[in-house]
Structure formats: C-alpha cells, structure tokens
Amino acid sequence: MSISLSSLILLPIWISMAQIQQGGPDEKEKTTALKDLLSRIDLDELMKKDEPPFDFPDTLEGFEYAFNEKGQLRHIKTGEPFVFNYREDLHRWNQKRYEALGEIITKYVYELLEKDCNLKKISIPVDATESEPKSFIFMSEDALTNPQKLMVLIHGSGVVRAGQWARRLIINEDLDSGTQIPFIKRAMDEGYGVIVLNPNENYIEVEKPKIRVKSSSDSSYEPAEKRERKDKVSKETKKRRDFYEKYRNPQREKEMMQLYIRENGSPEEHAVYVWDHFIAQSAAENVFFVAHSYGGLAFVELMIQREADVKSKVTAVALTDSVHNVWHQEAGKTIREWMRENCCNWVSSSEPLDTSVESMLPDCPRVSAGTDRHELTSWKSFPSIFKFFTEASEAKTSSLKPAVTRRSHRIKHEEL
C-alpha cells in the first residue's frame, strides 16, 4: 500500500492530536492550536506534490491513439477506447492529460477541414498587422461567390473550436457525432457554400512577464556593513519566496496572460464581425445558419445588432439545444416574430425526433432532437435540419413560409 507525501506530512499532527485529547483540560488549547494549523493547510496543494510532471505527448501517435476507419479514437496496441483515469487518485493529472489530448484533437480537426473538406483557413481580423493577435475561420472556395445557398455553422461555448460540436463526443464516440464534418460534406454535395465560425478563439495566451523591482536609491553610497546586511535580508527573502513558489506551484506551471483579438473578443463579437466582413458580402440569395447551444445566443445577438440585414439575407435558422433567451437578450417583438416563422430549435428530449415540444418562451418552435444528451442534439437532428432547409428554400421560392409547427405532425402522419 502506497502512502502519499501529504499523508506523511499530516501523520505527526494527527498523532499529536490523539495524544493531547487523552490529557486533561490544560491540553485543550494545544488541540485548538493544532486544529487551526490543519485548517490552514491546503490539502489540494499538498496533493500536487505527489503528481508526476505534466509532460504529455504533442501527437496522437505519442499518446498511442489513432482514429480507425469508423472515425473512433482507439489505442494503437489494445484497440480500447480512451481511458480518462489513466492514473488512479490523480484526477488533476488525468484532467491535464485529457486537455493535452484535446488540443491535439483540435489541430487534427483543423487538418480535416482543410484536407478532407477542402476548406480554406482565413485569418481575421482581415486588416490585422503582423504583430497583433489573430484568429481564423474556414470557408469553402465558393462561400462568397455561390449565388444560391450559403450554410454558416456556429458551435457552442467551452473548449470546442472551429469544426467541432463536442470534444467529448470526438474522444469517446466518433468524428461524425462530435464534428461538423458531416454537415459540411453534405452541404457541399447539395450545392451550398460553407462558412465555419470559430467563436471561442477570442485571445492568445502569452507568458506573463516577470516583474523586476528596481532599487529606489543608489546603494553605492551605502556603508559596506549596511549593504551586506541588506544583501543577506534579500537572499533570505528570495529563499522564502522560492520555497513558497515551490509549494504553491510544484509543477512549475507558467503563469499566462491573455491578449484579446480585436473585434473578436467574445462569441457575440465574432459572429457580428464574420457577418459584416464575409456573410453580408456573399452573393448567396439564401443563407442558412446551424447554431448549437451558445451559438444560438450568438445568433440572436447578431439579429439584435443587424436585424434588417439578417432578415433580408437569411432564409432559415436551425438551432440545436440553443441557450438563447429572447427576454434576457431583450430581443424586440419584430425579431421574435421573425424567429417564429424562420427558426426551429431541436432540443434535448426523450421524445422521438421532430416531436413538438412545448416552450415557455415566445420565440421559435421547439422540436425533439431525438436524444436527451445536449451534446448529441446537432448530430441526431442532422437529417431533419437539411429537410427543414430544403422546405424553407422551396417555400421562399413559391413565396410561402415554411410551416415548422405543423412539420412534426406531418412526419407522424406519414409514419402512420
């Protein structure tokens, strides 16, 4: 049985407390003092001292994982799925390992967008200088020139980046359910131009510069004895600081600072920026949005800021378990009316796919995504979303509005 360093440190204190409790009333003060000492010890920080270094591979091969022909992540040697608890009782280390793998997955998906989907990586801001922080989006070759249809994809909040719906699904399920690639490929097959937003890439991280304190006075005029005394105090102070830093940050993790990207410092800003500089400039007569979770909130914010432009260019919007709120976002009556006619929200529900689901908010119709798992709603509603877009396009051509609220009943009738 292994004993952790933190247990060895605390063991003498626990023994002392047990011995004191056997003594008389005079020993109560010592017990109180020891309890106070224990309350001041950060056990989480002590546990960090037992961790192995955060030295993880920077490739899938280094992790000994690869995606098989079904798009599933599997161990190269055993064929087993990814194991989160690689080391027992080291949750923080396991989490760091998972995050390191996640960063590799993000780069892998970027490569698939360019090589497998033939999308172009476009740097933003479009007028960025060489030295300022930058982000990027992905676009098909015909995104701005396609005269008919353009599809815009927006993921949710968190660690996901362009091309992903959910990192958890990519790692634990497969690429089809966790990425936007099936949407992109089908859209291109059906003649859509495609733009993939990157709303969580809001800043770059750089190492925080170390602050050096300069002496306020020239020490060359000080007596030698006084200067030696100050040097000794300075060395002792540095020694204590280094000891504390080793306790506080045993893994020697770098302290980082964030440099935000101009006009793209939040998902909402990013959506407006891409609209102004790309989507609004596109030739497409019909623009369609697919927005998951927080992406739905970003779309509603775009509508609030560019209402007339969005109404004139967007034909239909498919939301998947969107977290938007027309009251909190203060969307006006005309926006709510437009959403009722042109949007549909596929929400997490145990009901069959496309079954109507009641809503407390007066915005767009809500139907079941056919799953009660939030992260799966985009993938499960995939066929219904494309059918919704086709109906909306045909309705616009014939000057009719798509009857979204009756759609689920029609599906049920056809099944019967």
Image (tube, grey):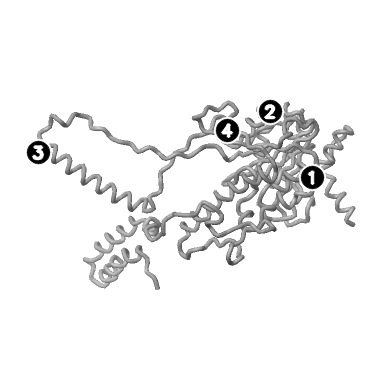
Q: How far apart are marks 3 and 4 (CA)?
A: 57 Å
Q: Nearer the viewer, residue 226 or 35?
A: 226
Q: Nearer the viewer, residue 23 or 212?
A: 212
Q: Which of 130 and 14 is in front in this view?
A: 130
Q: Dot 4 corresponds to which residue?
A: 264
Is 408 situated left or right of 2 in this image? right
Q: Dot 2 corresponds to which residue?
A: 306
Where, by quadrant of the figure, is residue 310 drawn?
top right
The reply to whether residue 99 is visible in this rendering is no
Q: Do the residues labelled 2 and 4 touch (CB within 8 Å)?
A: no
Q: Do the residues labelled 3 and 2 touch (CB within 8 Å)?
A: no
The amino acid type of the residue labelled 1 equals Phe
Q: Nearer the viewer, residue 215 or 129?
A: 129
Residue in view at x 59 percent, y 67 percent? 78
The amino acid type of the residue labelled 4 equals Asn
Q: Dot 3 corresponds to which residue?
A: 225
The numbered disc on residue 386 is 1
Where, by quadrant of the figure, is residue 396 drawn?
top right
Category of crowding for the residue at label 2, using alpha-carbon neighbours closer than 10 angstroms: few (below 14), some (14–19), many (at least 20): some
Category of crowding for the residue at label 3, using alpha-carbon neighbours closer than 10 angstroms: few (below 14), some (14–19), many (at least 20): few
Q: What element carries label 1?
A: helix
Q: Distance between the residues labelled 1 and 3?
A: 83 Å
Q: Do the residues labelled 4 and 1 touch (CB within 8 Å)?
A: no
Q: How far apart are marks 4 and 1 (CA)?
A: 29 Å
